[in-house]
Image: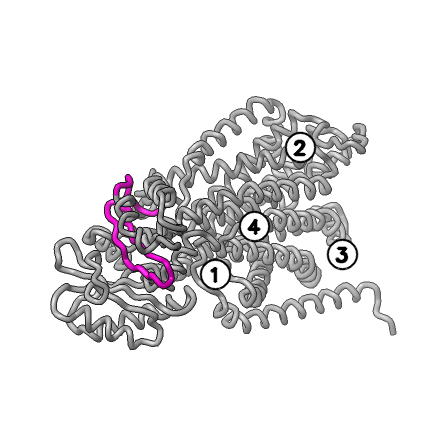
């Protein structure tokens, strides 16, 4: 007996849910293996002069320390620590003032000295080995105070603190986020659906990232990127699809017909949104920074999975739940319009904006430009222990090293000279370097006549990432040398990373703009609408990033955020991550808004009516979605790590500014001023005005 027509969709829905459940269980089982394959760090650009200089110096016997140990000077403490560390399997090299004759390893007052430690393996291996090395050092000198610092120790401390603070932020945000979802979806049951989509999308992204980690470097922060983008898109896609289903059922359509209509309209927007966001993230793969590439990969994977799950699993759940999907609305008796209904507030706002588009758009644009102005003064850096509170042991120990020692390791420039005259000319070259502005001392660390190479160490007291340190790196690289020169060190790494990001940006932005324009052009079938969308997105992003420069680079208002340490730079990878998430949300909102306005325009043929109706039907959805993202990310501002605070404030501010000020005011003002030209295309005939078909909700306005 053939199944009836009515049972076939339900069987397909059960199969869809079963497959999704199986994928979710598999993702949970594979998650530990995937996380174990991910690396750490990756914030420094690859293939740079600084990297080559460090590799050459290490081959010549002058390694850079991954771990620094501060201990009292005198006796045989340093010798015992060095001997103990050299017996450790994870330690590649250990040295002190006595073993190298380096006076810079003793403090100015002669009371303390440094032991440098080079560890084996990748960044992840070094982080895991650092506590073992510290324990071995302390066992070698029982009773002596041994203070660890250095990049490996700082990275480990930052990672541990970030994971702890993220868990706390999630616990703080979860109740508020669920309340927002209940208010937005009008049902306890429906509010759980975007959570399901987000969990499946992010969970299934983990095994994919673990698989990719065997081919490319994928640092752990990629998981945080997937979580942030996945949550935002899951809320957006679920909300817009559900709203359209309820809108169609309110007109009398049955559930299956409503789902079909939602797939044709909102489903098309979901597909174009996912394609546009992928087009925005893909160009970041051109930047030679492993962390940025990993963030881009994670964003693309979770975007495609969120769209797939929203278009398959969500409709299946709605079909199986039926009327129960609306169950549990605690505000049912006070709710004036349901999900999918037109908002009175946004209808009145859209009418006011389109009545005076010049004034409304001008004021919104002026405010956004004012917020964006500080971004012109941005200075890029690389994260270090200063992202921790000044009272954190790792940060405090590193600060004491910078204060007590004349040549802290993170203030050293490693200069490698190779050529026939490198060894003989090294002393004279050191004298020339010492006379440079921004260089306080220089010494010849190693000469190797057999390899015709020399390694010099130059002290530049300016903090890495500052203008003074960049000038010092340029001056050293530009000084006449007795051979080929490569300059490394922390300041050079930061400068080269910033230059790599800046150099790649024109290609990234060009590729991004072209891809986004083509996709939005295909979506709206217009030439003007995509160009307007790109211009508005640039202004919106500039406003968010300008505010971050004002707060996190210059320190204005830092007392409201636990008084973080002001470094006068912004971590390049973190800043680009905030830009990626904000751009993804901006493109997402733009696609849904343009799709709805175009749909209304094709229905009525009147530009202003289409704008008002489109804003009325999407304004509340966008603000609800933006508020959900803002609450979930703003909880990161409670962290003690400035890095997390920047992400939380940046994404929350970007989502709210874009959804409210940009989509609610600037976009309708610009579209109203452009009139029918919004939809112009060379081969398109603008539809003539038709008889307006009244909608049930329009009587509310």
Q: Earlier in the sequence, mark 3 or mark 2?
A: 3
Q: CA distance from mark 3 to mark 4?
A: 44 Å
Instruction: Indicate the position of residue 213 as horizontal and vertical percent values.
Output: 53, 65
Q: Residues within 10 Å of mark 3 (few under 14, many from 20)?
A: some
Q: Earlier in the sequence, mark 1 or mark 4?
A: 1
Between circles 1 and 4, the one closer to the viewer is 4
Q: Which residue is mark 4?
A: 286
Q: Which mark is residue 611?
A: 2
Instruction: Indicate the position of residue 595 as horizontal and vertical percent values.
Output: 69, 41
Q: Earlier in the sequence, mark 2 or mark 4?
A: 4
Q: Earlier in the sequence, mark 2 or mark 1?
A: 1
Q: CA distance from mark 1 to mark 3?
A: 43 Å
Q: Which residue is mark 3?
A: 256
Between circles 3 and 2, the one closer to the viewer is 2
Q: Which residue is mark 1?
A: 219
Q: Which residues are magenta?
A: 435-464
Q: Residues within 10 Å of mark 1 (few under 14, many from 20)?
A: many
């Amino acid at each position: 007996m053939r199944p009836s027509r009515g049972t076939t969709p339900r069987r397909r829905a059960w199969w869809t849910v079963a497959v999704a459940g199986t994928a979710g269980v598999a993702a949970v089982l594979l998650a530990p293996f995937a996380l174990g394959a991910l690396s750490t760090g990756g914030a420094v650009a690859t293939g740079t002069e600084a990297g080559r200089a460090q590799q050459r110096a290490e081959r010549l016997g002058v390694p850079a320390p991954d771990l620094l140990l501060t201990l009292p000077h005198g006796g045989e403490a340093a010798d015992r620590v060095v001997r103990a560390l050299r017996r450790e399997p994870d330690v590649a090299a250990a040295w002190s003032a006595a073993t190298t004759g380096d006076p810079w390893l003793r403090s100015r007052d002669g009371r303390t000295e440094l032991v440098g430690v080079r560890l084996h393996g990748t960044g992840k291996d070094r982080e895991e080995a650092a506590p073992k090395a510290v324990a071995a050092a302390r066992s070698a000198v029982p009773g002596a105070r041994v203070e660890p610092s250095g990049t490996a120790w700082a990275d480990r401390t930052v990672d541990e603190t970030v994971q702890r603070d993220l868990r706390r932020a999630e616990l703080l945000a979860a109740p508020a986020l669920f309340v927002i979802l209940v208010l937005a979806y009008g049902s306890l049951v429906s509010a759980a659906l975007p959570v399901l989509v987000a969990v499946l999308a992010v969970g299934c992204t983990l095994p994919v990232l673990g698989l990719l980690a065997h081919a490319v470097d994928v640092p752990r922060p990629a998981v945080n990127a997937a979580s942030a983008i996945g949550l935002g898109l899951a809320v957006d896609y679920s909300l817009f699809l559900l709203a359209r289903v309820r809108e169609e059922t309110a007109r009398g359509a049955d559930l299956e017909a409503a789902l079909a209509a939602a797939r044709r309209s909102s489903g098309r927007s979901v597909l174009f949104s996912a394609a546009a966001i992928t087009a925005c993230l893909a160009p970041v793969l051109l930047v030679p920074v492993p962390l940025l590439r990993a963030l881009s990969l994670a964003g693309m994977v979770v975007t495609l999975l969120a769209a797939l799950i929203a278009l398959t699993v969500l409709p299946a759940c709605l079909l199986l739940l039926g009327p129960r999907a609306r169950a549990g609305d605690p505000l049912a008796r006070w709710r004036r319009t349901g999900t999918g209904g037109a908002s009175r507030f946004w209808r009145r706002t859209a009418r006011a904006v389109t009545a005076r588009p010049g004034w409304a758009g001008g004021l919104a644009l002026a405010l956004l430009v004012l917020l964006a102005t500080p971004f012109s003064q941005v200075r890029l850096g690389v994260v270090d222990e200063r992202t921790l509170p000044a009272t954190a042991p790792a940060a405090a120990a590193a600060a004491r090293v910078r204060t007590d020692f004349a040549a802290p390791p993170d203030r050293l420039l490693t200069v490698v000279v190779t050529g026939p005259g490198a060894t003989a000319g090294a002393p004279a070259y050191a004298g020339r370097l010492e006379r440079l502005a921004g260089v306080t001392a220089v010494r010849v660390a190693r000469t190797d006549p057999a390899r015709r190479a020399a390694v010099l160490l130059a002290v530049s007291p300016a903090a890495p990432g500052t203008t003074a340190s960049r000038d010092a790196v340029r001056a050293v690289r530009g000084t006449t040398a007795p051979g080929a020169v490569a300059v490394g060190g922390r300041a050079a790494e930061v400068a080269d990373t910033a230059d790599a990001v800046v150099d790649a940006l024109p290609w990234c932005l060009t590729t991004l703009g072209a891809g986004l324009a083509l996709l939005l052009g295909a979506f709206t079938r217009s030439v003007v609408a995509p160009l307007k969308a790109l211009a508005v997105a640039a202004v919106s992003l500039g406003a968010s990033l300008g505010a971050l420069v004002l707060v996190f680079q210059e320190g204005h208002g830092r007392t409201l955020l636990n008084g973080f340490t002001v470094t006068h730079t912004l971590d390049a990878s973190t800043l680009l991550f905030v830009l990626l998430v904000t751009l993804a949300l901006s493109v997402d909102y733009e696609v849904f808004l343009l799709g709805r306005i175009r749909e209304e325009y094709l229905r009525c043929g009147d530009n202003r009516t289409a704008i008002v109706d489109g804003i009325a039907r999407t304004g509340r959805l966008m603000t609800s979605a933006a508020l959900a993202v803002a609450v979930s990310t703003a909880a990161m501002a409670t962290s003690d790590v400035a890095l997390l605070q920047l992400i939380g404030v940046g994404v929350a501010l970007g989502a709210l500014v874009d959804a409210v000020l940009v989509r609610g005011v600037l976009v309708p003002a610009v579209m109203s001023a452009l009139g029918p030209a919004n939809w112009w295309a060379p081969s398109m005939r603008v539809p003539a005005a038709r008889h307006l078909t009244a909608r049930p909700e329009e009587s509310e306005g």
